[in-house]
């Protein structure tokens, strides 16, 4: 009897979760295969365009979102600074749901495996993924978004170059 | 029979516990989880082939009833909610395997199945979670448990820092002499390591959980 009750409960839970999945995933964003920021000048490798998930989070919807209003800058750790000195492109990506060290670990593991990435650091304080690419390498916004999904998370916005360094005019 | 097989299949699709603090890892990641509470001790090694599920091998020693369960243990991340400052997860967990007597228990081996749900919501300083599990181990018996946990972090550590959480877990096991018990615990978290140490105040039993992600 208990077994049947359990199966019923689990079936109900599964149905609920599937129903929830059919709805929009988040409170303040929506899915798109298009990035929030595109730097097409950096896209020389179109094979990288693998259409990962990325959140569009507007300043109107979030107010204090680091990708819109706060303009989180690149966090300069020792590795990040060394990679910058080598001439790699800096990238800052705002990450949704990154609240613990396991989250940071997952992002670090996934991104550090990529040849294009010279340095990676997830800053829990700013909720941002900080990347510096190897000199001459490129990584599209879609690739960054897809890699974040592989880690279990979602990108809200991507900034590059001077904007990532907080030096954009 | 078909209904039973369908039930088993459903259960085998289902997942596991607070200590896992993300029982599904990143794609390609491995995780080792040890748990020990007032009833049982267990070890689980799981692999995450995709961000929505993991599969592992689990051994559980039921100290009170002198039997062990050796199982294949899938976990499905059915839903993850993302926010700027929070994350919520809903998991289904389960397993199918063999139950064997240990110590002086001479009963024959039996097929064992279990399944349940787990949900959590957390920010960098607050945590709330719930989990349940039903185990059917044939003539070794069946067990149901569910537990809720709340916690807070007295400070917010950054990546690589030592993260500290203070938590309280209330569990309910209807078949037990003490069906409801309370366990305050401390969770220490640094990089790939997670350690939980607590003490069940109701039945005077320690709680020790350990997770390593690689």
Image: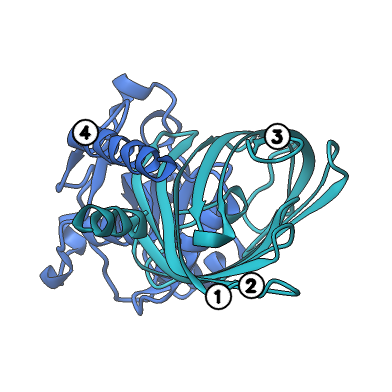
Quarter of the figure that contains the N terminus of chain A:
top left
Q: CA distance from mark 2 to mark 3?
A: 24 Å
Task: Pick whichever, A42 or B176, lies toward us.
Answer: B176
Chain shown blue: that is: A
Residue identified by numbered label 3: B179
Secondary element at image label 4: helix
Query: Residue visible at 28% across and 28% down?
Result: A58
Residue B95 in picture, x, y percent from top left: 43, 62
Query: Residue visible at 54% across and 43% down?
Result: A99
Q: Residues within 10 Å of mark 4 (few under 14, many from 20)?
A: few
Q: Quadrant of residue A90?
A: bottom left
Secondary element at image label 3: loop
| Residue at the limit of the structure toward the left, as seen here | A46
Q: Is residue A52 left or right of residue A71?
A: left
Chain shown cyan: that is: B
Residue B40 in picture, x, y percent from top left: 69, 58
**Chain to which the residue tagged by mark 2 belongs:** B
User: Which label lies toward us, 3 or 4?
Assistant: 3
Residue identified by numbered label 2: B101
For the residues bearing labels 2 and 3, Cβ distance under 8 angstroms: no
For the residues bearing labels 1 and 2, Cβ distance under 8 angstroms: yes
* Residue B210 in view (yes/no): no
Count of labels shown? 4
Task: Pick whichever, B196 or B39, lies toward us.
Answer: B39
Residue identified by numbered label 1: B108
Residue identified by numbered label 4: A19
Q: CA distance from mark 3 to mark 4?
A: 34 Å
Quarter of the figure that contains the C terminus of chain A:
top left
């Amino acid at each position: 009897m208990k077994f049947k009750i359990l199966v019923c409960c689990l079936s109900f839970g599964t149905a609920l979760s599937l129903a929830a999945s059919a709805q929009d995933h988040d409170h303040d964003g929506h899915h798109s295969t298009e990035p929030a920021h595109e730097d097409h000048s950096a896209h020389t490798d179109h094979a990288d365009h693998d259409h990962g998930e990325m959140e569009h989070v507007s300043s109107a919807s979030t107010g204090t979102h680091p990708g819109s209003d706060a303009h989180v800058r690149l966090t300069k750790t020792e590795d990040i600074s060394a990679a910058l000195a080598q001439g790699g492109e800096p990238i800052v990506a705002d990450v949704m749901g990154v609240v613990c060290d396991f989250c940071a670990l997952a992002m670090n593991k996934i991104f550090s495996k990529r040849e294009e990435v010279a340095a990676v650091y997830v800053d829990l304080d700013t909720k941002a993924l900080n990347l510096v690419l190897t000199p001459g390498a490129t990584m599209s916004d879609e690739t960054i978004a897809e890699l974040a999904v592989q880690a279990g998370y979602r990108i809200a916005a991507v900034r590059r170059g001077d904007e990532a360094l907080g030096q954009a005019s | 029979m078909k209904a039973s097989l369908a039930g088993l299949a459903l259960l085998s699709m289902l997942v596991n516990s607070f200590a896992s603090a993300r029982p599904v890892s990143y794609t390609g990641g491995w995780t080792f989880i040890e748990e020990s509470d007032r009833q049982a001790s267990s070890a689980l090694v799981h692999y995450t082939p995709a961000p929505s599920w993991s599969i592992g091998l689990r051994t559980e020693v039921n100290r009170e009833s002198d039997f062990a369960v050796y199982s294949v243990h899938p976990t499905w991340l059915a839903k993850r909610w993302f926010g700027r400052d929070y994350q919520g997860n809903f998991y289904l967990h389960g397993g199918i395997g063999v139950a064997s007597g240990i110590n002086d228990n001479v009963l024959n081996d039996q097929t064992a199945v279990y399944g349940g749900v787990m949900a959590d919501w957390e920010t960098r300083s607050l945590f709330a979670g719930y989990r349940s599990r039903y185990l059917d181990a044939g003539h070794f018996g069946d067990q149901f448990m569910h537990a809720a946990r709340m916690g807070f972090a007295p400070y917010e550590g950054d990546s690589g820092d030592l993260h500290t959480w203070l938590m309280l877990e209330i569990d309910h096991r209807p078949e037990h002499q003490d069906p409801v018990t309370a366990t305050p615990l401390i969770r220490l978290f640094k990089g790939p390591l997670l350690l939980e140490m607590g003490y069940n105040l109701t039945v005077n039993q320690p709680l020790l959980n350990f997770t390593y992600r690689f």
